[in-house]
């Protein structure tokens, strides 16, 4: 289902992505913290959602809502509703994987009579 390390191990994320209740405002969970970390890693900063140790707090409040809606708008998830359901989580996963996966150059074929 997921390819990013962020989402593979989190049951709340997997539940929301497979048609369960979307992650949404008011929720406090490790799934929210994982989603916050993914958004932050993609550049959606949430300074008020970190505690004194700079760890995201797992509370889905106004700042997380704004970051998620911004992400949804940027990647063209419809509707832009600030809920992390299957479509939004799939796009987050895609973006994370593409950020950390470097394309592999095709092998260079050596042609006789030309230096490699």
Image (tube, helix red, strand yellow):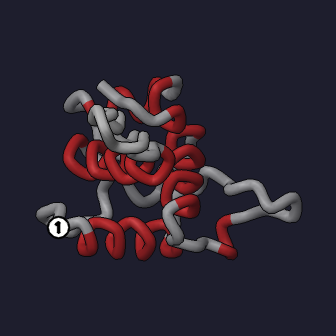
Residue at image position (34%, 68%) is 71
Label 1 sits on residue: 76
Q: Is residue 72 visible?
A: yes
Residue at image position (46%, 26%) is 8
Residue 111, horizontal then vertical, whole percent:
27, 35
Q: Nearer the viewer, residue 20 or 69?
A: 69
Q: Nearer the viewer, residue 96 or 17?
A: 96
Q: Is residue 97 visible?
A: no
Could you tell whether 57 is left or right of 97 in the image?
right
Q: Nearer the viewer, residue 81 or 1?
A: 1
Could you tell whether 4 is left or right of 34 in the image?
left
Q: Secondary structure at mark 1?
A: loop
Residue 47 falls in which quadrant of the image? bottom right
Residue at image position (68%, 74%) is 48
Residue 18, horizontal then vertical, whole percent:
24, 28
Residue 101, horizontal then vertical, whole percent:
45, 43
The number of numbered badges drawn on the structure is: 1
In the rendered image, the residue lying farthest to the right is 52
In the rendered image, the residue lying farthest to the front is 113
| Image quarter in which the C terminus is found | top left
Residue 3, horizontal then vertical, whole percent:
39, 31
| Image quarter in which the N terminus is found | top left
Q: Residues within 10 Å of mark 1 (few under 14, many from 20)?
A: few
| 81, above or below 27, in the image | below
């Amino acid at each position: 289902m997921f390819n990013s390390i962020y989402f593979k191990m989190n049951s709340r994320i997997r539940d929301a992505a497979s048609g369960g209740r979307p992650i949404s405002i008011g929720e406090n969970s490790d799934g929210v913290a994982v989603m916050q970390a993914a958004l932050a890693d993609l550049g959606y900063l949430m300074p008020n959602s970190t505690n004194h140790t700079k760890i995201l707090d797992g509370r889905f409040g106004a700042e997380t809502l704004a970051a998620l809606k911004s992400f949804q708008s940027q990647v063209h998830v419809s509707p832009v509703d600030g809920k992390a359901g299957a479509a939004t989580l799939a796009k987050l996963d895609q973006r994370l994987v593409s950020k950390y996966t470097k394309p592999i150059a095709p092998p260079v074929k050596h042609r006789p009579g030309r230096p490699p």
